[in-house]
Each structure stands twice: as C-alpha cells, then as structure tokens.
Image (cartoon, rainbow, N blue to C red):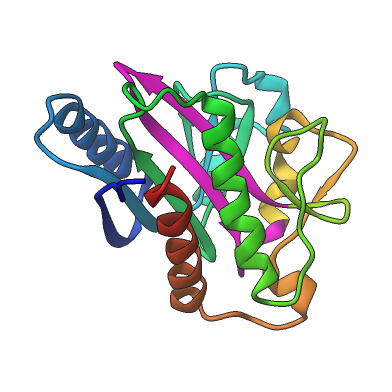
Amino acid sequence: MEQRTIDVRRPGRIRYAPALDLQMELHAQRVAGEIPDTILLLEHDPVFTLGRQGRRDSLLVSEEELQRRGIDLHHIDRGGDITYHGPGQVVAYFIVDISHRNKDIKRLIHALEEAMIRTAGEYGLTADRDQQYPGVWVGEGKIGAVGLRIDHGVTRHGIAFNVNTNLEDFRLINPCGIIDKSVTSLQKELGREVPMDEVTDALGRHLLELLGNW
C-alpha cells in the first residue's frame, strides 16, 4: 500500500480562535490540493467548545463565571457535545482528504482512538474504547476525546488527550454530555507529571503510523 504524505506541524500553545482560523485556512488549501494531508499538534489556553449536538445545560456555570476564570467558550461545527481544552492536554487536528480513499469516518475515528490507546500503553496503562461513548477510557475515566467534521471530503477538528490537564475544569461541564463517568489523565493515573513533548512525540508517531497506511 502506498504511504501517504502527511505534514505534521507543532505550533505550540495557542488560543482556540487563532487555531480555528489556521484549521480553516489549511482546510481550504487541502480542498484545493495545495498542501498534503496535515496534522496540527498543539496545546490550548483554557477553553470549552460546544459542538453541533451540544446542549447549553451541559455547561454548568454562567458565561460570566467563565470570563472570571479566564476560560473561553466557542460554539463550533464538529460533532459531539461540550468538551474542554487546556494546558497539559495534547490536541491533534486533522486536515485529511478522505474523499478518494473509500474509507468511512468510523474507521478513521477507530484509528485516532487507537493512536491514543497505544500512547497510553507506552506508560503502562490499559486504555480502551467504550461501546456506548466515543473516545478512549482508562477504567471509568475518559482520557481521550474525538470530534470530527468533514467538508468537501476533507476532515477538520480531531482529538484531545489528557496528559497533565487540570481536571478540575471538567467539573464545570458534563464532558461530552456524559453525566455518569469521570475524566482522567496520564498524570492522575501515574501519580506524576509527564513531559508534554514526550507524549506529543509518542502520539504523533502513532498517528503517522496508523494514518500513513490508512
């Protein structure tokens, strides 16, 4: 099978709005065939994003309280409900052309989940999928989230993997609309802080391996 070309960019820590602008710019370029498939690996300043299926009551505090805490709120066009991004979390956005690959979105999501499962495995954790909910779980704790959108055969948005994430901020929402489970992170499961660059390298490596031959 021919190895696809994938460009990986690491813009560092960035607020959500400029990252979304960058996604849209790259998406337009990918649709036009001007760039190869592209993955963005980054961290965000604290932000809640509310997807197309999102319900306002999944946010448990007022927008004024979010402003007081320095947390942004964005209504976006990916699938899913509400989720949190912030420092200590690796976010990967995918600008990937799937229009001519005869692959369905479920297989792509499965590959993205697998990359997070393999990354957790490098730290001795057994992570897995939940048949009821998308994402990746360690026991009853969600460690990785997935949310995508496809326009003109090219994907946008992506995954978020909790490394040293401030899990207290998740208490302000029902993450992804789920009320009967918790969230977790590598730091919580291991009992120690984990170098972000190390985890970003590992996740990026697994994504390239899985998507390169997808």
Q: Residue 95, image x and y in percent? A: 31, 37
Residue found farthest to the front = 1
Going 74% across and 29% down the picture, which residue do you hit? 177
Tell me if I can see residue 47 in this picture. yes
Q: Is residue 109 magenta?
A: no
Residue found farthest to the left = 34
Q: In the shown orientation, is residue 154 left or right of residue 213?
A: left
Q: Which residues are magenta?
A: 143-167
Q: Is residue 163 magenta?
A: yes
Going 75% across and 76% down the picture, which residue do you hit? 124
Task: Tell me the quarter of the picture where residue 51 sits.
Answer: top right
* Magenta portion: prevailing SS class: strand
Q: Nearer the viewer, residue 41 or 120?
A: 120
Q: Nearer the viewer, residue 22 or 9?
A: 9
Q: Residue 185, image x and y in percent? A: 70, 64
Q: Nearer the viewer, residue 95 or 87?
A: 95
